[in-house]
Image: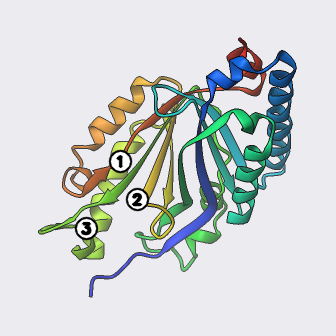
Amino acid sequence: MVEAVETMDGWYSLHDLRSIDWNAWKLATEEERKQAIDSLHKLLDKWEAVEEAKDGSQVLYKVLGQKADLMFMFLRPTMDELSEMETELSKSKMGEFLLPAHSYVSVVELSKYRESKDGIDPETLPETQARLKPILPKWEYICFYPMDRRRQGDENWYTLEKNVRAKMLYEHSKTGRKYAGKVKQIITGSIGLDDWEWGVTLFAHEPLEFKKIVYEMRFDEVSSKYGEFGEFFVGNHLPKEHLRTYLSI
């Protein structure tokens, strides 16, 4: 049998995308809109305190295009905490004006394709734990998309030997390292958790870097032969202090 690879799993992830009911928002009174914005500020303050304690992380972006208006990305140690965050957002005054648009459930993942050195379990290393439990960057732009590994005929990722898969992924990682400092990537595993096998979240200071890195990586064999991709969601960072301006009528 082909050998499966062991994974190292960190914080659970929820991409929570909402559309704003702009008609209801415009019909609301000024006081109702103020209460709604205040309720979201209160939640953001609460979540930021968790991030400061390094017990989770989150970001908020404005989605470009018609797929949604807002994208929250939450990271927490347990799924129960993600469920609580999703529910408290829906129950808030702001939640009265938010419509579910899309969601994605996964867990931060690193694969153990490379052998441990000197008998040290890589999962115990501080740098590994920092990658499994990351503080999300508040960079200007975000890009999120789900992906699968192809399972068709001779192009079946799950029939390849482990060392073959490892070599292709290593070559793929070399392409990604060319964008160090330009693109920050978070890989989350979603097999058994959502419709696709992985989620890819990219952060950048310049949105053109998304196009460049995704295009260049398409030529790596692991993508050109074995990559299947879902919808792409891109957005602009929405700092808490800009909420009132964004929602002003």
SS state under label 1 = loop
168, 66: nearer the viewer: 66
**What's the CA distance linking mark 3 and mark 2?**
15 Å
Picture residue at 70% right of the left edge, 32% below the top: 97
- Give the residue pinned by disc 3: 157
Which amino acid does the dot numbered 1 rest on?
Gly
- Give the residue pinned by disc 2: 196
Q: Quadrant of residue 216?
A: top left
**What's the CA distance linking mark 1 and mark 3?**
17 Å
Picture residue at 41% right of the left edge, 28% below the top: 209
**What's the CA distance linking mark 2 and mark 1?**
8 Å
| First of labels 2, 1 by sequence position | 2
- Give the residue pinned by disc 1: 230
Which amino acid does the dot numbered 2 rest on?
Trp
Numbered mark located on residue 159 in the image: none
**Up/down of 133 relative to 20, above or below:** below
Q: Position of residue 204 (x, y in %)?
A: 51, 30
| First of labels 3, 2 by sequence position | 3
Q: Is residue 78 visible?
A: no
68, 75: nearer the viewer: 68
Q: Position of residue 104 (x, y in %)?
A: 53, 53
| First of labels 1, 3 by sequence position | 3
